[in-house]
Amino acid sequence: MKRTLRRAESMAMLSPATVTVLIADDDPDAREVLGEVLELMLPGVRTVFAADGLDAVAVAIDVCPWAVILDLGMPRLDGLDAAQRLQQRMGKNLPILIAASGDYKRLREGYGVFDYSLRKPIQVDRLARYLARAMVFADGSERPDPPASD
């Protein structure tokens, strides 16, 4: 929670046009649909994509997104390992990390690494709530920890 608050503080009063979200999923349809959903929820948001964990790390380091949604079951480097690499390499510029998986046990493995977890199929209202929480508490006010998963 503390890291999420610090990241939110540094992004105070974000407008969607200033937000970049990285979507990393090995399923091209899932990436595309989630990107379209984000663009409808946050008009002007910039979405970037990666097909696996290694690409996700490279893209995140290059574009420094505000949030990263990582599928946990990707090839070459899974979402959990990609998140851990991002934590090591991005330091204070670490984005909001969101895990996505249809496997509840895999989501549990990510506790303590991810800021939020979403069970697939992703519930759009839950994703919107998580993103709104990350944006709204830019003043650093205390709030309860977000739920870890669906």
Image (cartoon, rainbow, N blue to C red):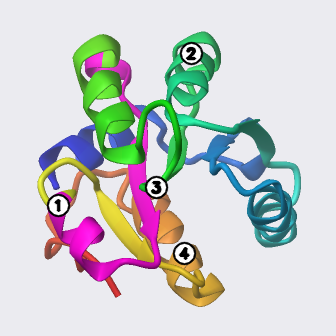
Q: CA distance from mark 1 to mark 3?
A: 12 Å
Quadrant (top left, top right, bottom left, bottom right) of the N terminus: bottom left
Residue under pointer 2: 58
Decide which of tag 3 and tag 4 comes sooner along the chain.
3
Q: CA distance from mark 2 to mark 4?
A: 24 Å
Q: Are marks 2 and 4 in contact (CB under 8 Å)?
A: no
Decide which of tag 2 and tag 3 comes sooner along the chain.
2
Q: Residues within 10 Å of mark 4 (few under 14, many from 20)?
A: some
Judging depth in this view, the residue of 66 and 112 nearest the camera is 112
Residue under pointer 3: 73
Which numbered marker is on residue 109? 1
Q: Amino acid at mark 1?
A: Glu
Front tag of 1 and 4:
1
* Residue 83 left/right relative to 141: right
Q: What number of labels is visible?
A: 4
The image quarter in which residue 150 lies = bottom left
